[in-house]
Image: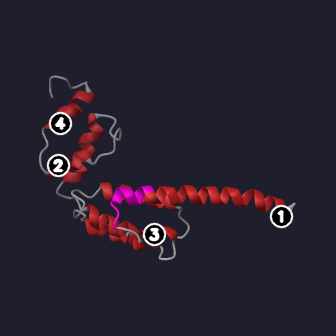
Amino acid sequence: MTLYPNNDALMCKIFSMTLYGKAQDWFHTLPPRSIRNFNELSLIFTKEYSSYHSIKKKSNHLFNMKNDPNESLCIYVKRFKAKKVKIIECNNSIACLAFRNGLPADHPLFRELIMGENLALIDSYDLAKKHSLWNKANRSQKLPEQLRKDA
């Protein structure tokens, strides 16, 4: 790495090849294009693996996630995904249950997830996206009706 100190992309790639085990798992959870240079990568790595680092979160920490009543379903899904990515070796079955349980009990998606077949987490995300699109279309359809009533 000392041969190419000015080539950030190469240094990041070489650095990733030196990792193994949990450190390599952590590296692969980083979102694409989230690291701009080697200094940023080394800072993030140091924070993740320094002796001052807080306790590692496990899959069951996702049960603390709740869909805020003032929050759209899309935002909840994004928050949930962001939190899940930070959990190394996250159990997808637990994550799927936590995702469902974070929804309000009267939410149509919650009812569909609890009454339907056991879906994989990715399928639950897809279903949430469909519900978001349906809600958006429903709201946009109601807007012209409201304008006609007000006129």
Q: Residue visible at 45% across and 59% down?
A: 127
| Residue 53, quarter of picture | bottom left
Q: Residue visible at 27% across and 48% down?
A: 29
- First-in-chain label (4 vs 3): 4
- First-in-chain label (2 vs 1): 2
Dot 1: what SS?
helix
Residue highlighted by disc 2? 23
Amino acid at circle 2:
Ala
- First-in-chain label (4 vs 2): 4
Pick whichever, 42 or 85, lies toward us: 85
- Which image quadrant: the N terminus? top left
| Magenta residue check for 121 | yes
Q: Return the x and y of residue 67 as percentages of the image width and height.
A: 47, 68
Amino acid at circle 1:
Lys
Mark 3, mark 2: which one is toward the viewer?
Answer: 3
Q: Residue visible at 35% across and 41% down?
A: 34
- Main SS, magenta region, reads helix
Residue highlighted by disc 4? 15
Mark 4, mark 1: which one is toward the viewer?
Answer: 1
Q: Residue visible at 76% across and 56% down?
A: 144
Query: Which residues make up the magenta segment?
Result: 118-126
